[in-house]
Image: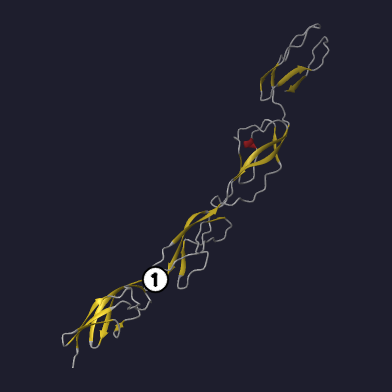
Amino acid sequence: DVTIENIEIKEGPEKTEYLIGERLDTTGLVLTVTYSDNTTEEITEGFTCSPTELNTAGTQEITVTYGSKTTTFEVEVSKRTIYMTGIKFEDKTVTYNGQAQSIEIEGTVPEGVTVTYEGNDKVNAGTYTVTAKFEVDTNIYNAISDMTATLTIEKANPQYNAPTGLTAIYGETLGEVELPEGYSWEAEETTKVGNAGTNTFTVKYTPQDTENYNEVTGIEVEIEVAKAEPTVNPIYNVEATIYLEGELPQISLSEGDTEGTIEWDEYTLQVGTKAYSWTFTPT
């Protein structure tokens, strides 16, 4: 009886590259069979191959069996790639509100993929990097690259009530006008409050929590400025001899913080000693 002595691969299959989970395709595989009588034959069917389910990534050896003889050939098996199409992970800007803020994936995550986040759940104002990490079965799928986005929490504008009921006296400075806690003058504190009447200035408000709230500037406030009592130190002759046809001596300012003029009150010169009064008129 003629028996099979040997089999060899004459031509390998057309397909030699696979993805995990695909079945072996032997199209194009040609074997050369050598018999015991030294004859040969080329065959394209009648043999079996193992394995036929390709479930391990890497170079896979395929065993071909014909009769009682075997030979092998190799194929390359690659992990599958999950394409994250339709998935968005975008920057987000919000205003501080005391609540935890996060960024999450937008879109439908493919089956077999789970997502975890690093850098989420931030409360205070600031700029944070959030990372989305994707987990898959790396025996079957290629790893999916992380995605990053920037979470920006902007400072909020605080609630405030502009100061009211501010009063001053002519000649005083802003530094002498008391403001509620958190408020300060935008002008120098040495600035005068201005003439008697209602004068407008600006203040700024600085909240206690400057990490999460903005400073507010340009807040207009009114100061009711009252008239001041003048401070004058005139120079005049306390005692003088005045003749009936003469005039009272001139009076001038020597010291004081108020400008103005001093004049003797109306008088009638008489013989004898008499005290006269004067009037100050501020300018």
Left or right of 37 on screen, residue 213: right
Vertical relation: 209 (above or below) 24: above
Vertical relation: 30 (above or below) 81: below
Closer to the camera, 219 or 278? 219
Vertical relation: 271 (above or below) 54: above
Q: Residue flagged by tag 1: what amino acid is it?
A: Arg
Q: Residue at x 59, y 52 (%)?
A: 156
In the picture of the structure, the residue carrying the numbered disc 1 is 80
Q: Spot the residue most to the bottom.
A: 1
Residue count near mark 1 (Cα–Cα under 10 Å), binned few <14, some 14–19, many ≥20? some
| Quadrant of residue 217 within the rendered picture | top right
| Quadrant of residue 10 within the rendered picture | bottom left
Can the viewer see residue 59 in this picture?
A: no
Q: Residue at x 29, y 78 (%)?
A: 29
Closer to the camera, 278 or 13? 13
Q: Residue at x 51, y 68 (%)?
A: 108
